[in-house]
């Protein structure tokens, strides 16, 4: 049985003071939760404060990006050593916002995935189609390329560590959630690709999260689908009650 994983991607929100308040609230509400893996991904500036707060709880910390390089002249970048120093365990990689605004390519994202695994960080690889892709019948084609290219060279045993997040771009921050059937269909498709790439055991073990307007009200139905193993939450992760509500739905 795959353990559900609910991660909050705070994106470019929360000052340190606000992050501390949110992390304290979540620690109070869900800090002892062992049935579901709970991950908070604050902006880099709040990583240390959030990490300190949740250190004595069941909550893990993730970053929203990571450099593919080890160190050196890469202005504005953050590398694995810096993240591990702050007890970061997960790294969101290839989020559609980074692909769109910062032109991250599959090849680049793949370098980051490989680096993260090599350094014992758990990648959350994001994939998903745009509205245009979906309307032109290209969802599977687009998602397949992102999965195959993003996970190129990853060994079968790493699939217990890494997480794939299916985030249809048209559902992110729009309030337009994919129906449970639509999401399940793509999740099963992704699991099939993993099976084809590295075998049934890895495909069975890998956790695939759904992301895109997940809220306490729609979480239970999405999370009850056989291939949906959790959620990557944006807007609803910025508030204690709504994020805790989704975690409770995942239990
Ligand atoms: P929303 O939950 O705000 O739609 O964002 C989803 C997302 O992009 C998480 O990474």
Image (cartoon, helix red, strand yellow):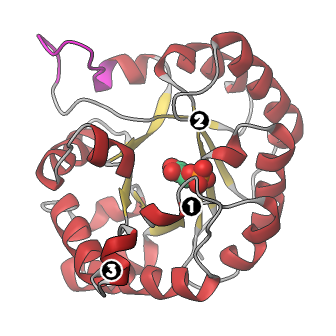
Horizontal relation, residue 217 to residue 92: left or right? right
Q: Is residue 45 above or below residue 128?
A: above
Contact, CB < 8 Å: mark 1 with mark 3?
Answer: no
Query: What secondary structure is marked by label 1?
Result: loop
Q: In the image, which residues are magenta?
A: 70-81
Task: Give the residue at mark 2.
Answer: 10
Picture coordinates of residue 248 (x, y %)?
A: 83, 59
Picture coordinates of residue 55 (x, y %)?
A: 67, 24
Which mark is first along the chain, 2 or 1? 2
Q: CA distance from mark 1 to mark 3?
A: 15 Å
Q: What's the residue at 72%, 11% (across, down)?
A: 17
Q: Quadrant of residue 194?
A: bottom left
Residue 78 painted magenta: yes
Horizontal relation, residue 68 to residue 176: left or right? left
Q: CA distance from mark 2 to mark 3?
A: 26 Å
Main secondary structure type of the part rendered in magenta = loop
Whether ligand 1 has any atom under 8 Å from the Cβ at mark 1 is answered as: yes
176 or 244, which lies in front? 176
Query: What secondary structure is marked by label 3?
Result: helix
Whether ligand 1 has any atom under 8 Å from the Cβ at mark 2 is answered as: no
Q: Which mark is residue 139?
A: 3
Q: CA distance from mark 1 to mark 2?
A: 13 Å
Picture coordinates of residue 134 (x, y %)?
A: 37, 79
Locate the N terminus and report the quarter of the image it occupies: bottom right
157 or 243, which lies in front? 243
Task: Give the residue at mark 1.
Answer: 212
Which mark is first along the chain, 3 or 2? 2
Query: What secondary structure is marked by label 2?
Result: loop
Which mark is first along the chain, 3 or 1? 3
Q: Quadrant of residue 144?
A: bottom left
52 or 218, which lies in front? 218
Horizontal relation, residue 65 to residue 174: left or right? left
């Amino acid at each position: 049985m795959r353990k559900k994983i609910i991660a909050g991607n705070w994106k470019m929100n929360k000052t340190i003071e606000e992050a501390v308040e949110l992390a304290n609230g979540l620690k109070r509400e869900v800090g002892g939760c062992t049935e579901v893996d709970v991950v908070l991904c604050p902006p880099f500036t709040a990583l240390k404060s959030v990490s300190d707060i949740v250190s004595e709880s069941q909550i893990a910390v993730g970053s929203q990006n990571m450099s593919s390089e080890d160190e050196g002249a890469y202005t504005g970048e953050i590398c694995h050593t810096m993240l591990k120093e702050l007890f970061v365990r997960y790294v969101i990689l290839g989020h559609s916002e980074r692909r769109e605004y910062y032109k991250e390519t599959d090849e680049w994202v793949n370098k980051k995935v490989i680096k993260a695994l090599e350094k014992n960080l758990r990648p959350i690889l994001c994939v998903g189609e745009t509205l245009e892709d979906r309307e032109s019948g290209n969802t599977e084609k687009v998602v397949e390329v992102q999965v195959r290219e993003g996970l190129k060279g990853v060994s079968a045993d790493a699939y217990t560590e890494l997480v794939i997040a299916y985030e249809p771009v048209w559902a992110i921050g729009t309030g337009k959630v994919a129906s449970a059937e639509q999401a399940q269909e793509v999740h099963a498709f992704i699991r099939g690709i993993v099976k084809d790439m590295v075998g049934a055991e890895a495909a069975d073990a890998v956790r695939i999260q759904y992301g895109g307007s997940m809220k306490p009200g729609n979480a239970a139905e999405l999370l009850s689908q056989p291939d949906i193993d959790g959620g990557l939450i944006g807007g609803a992760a910025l508030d204690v009650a709504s994020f805790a509500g989704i975690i409770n739905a995942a239990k």
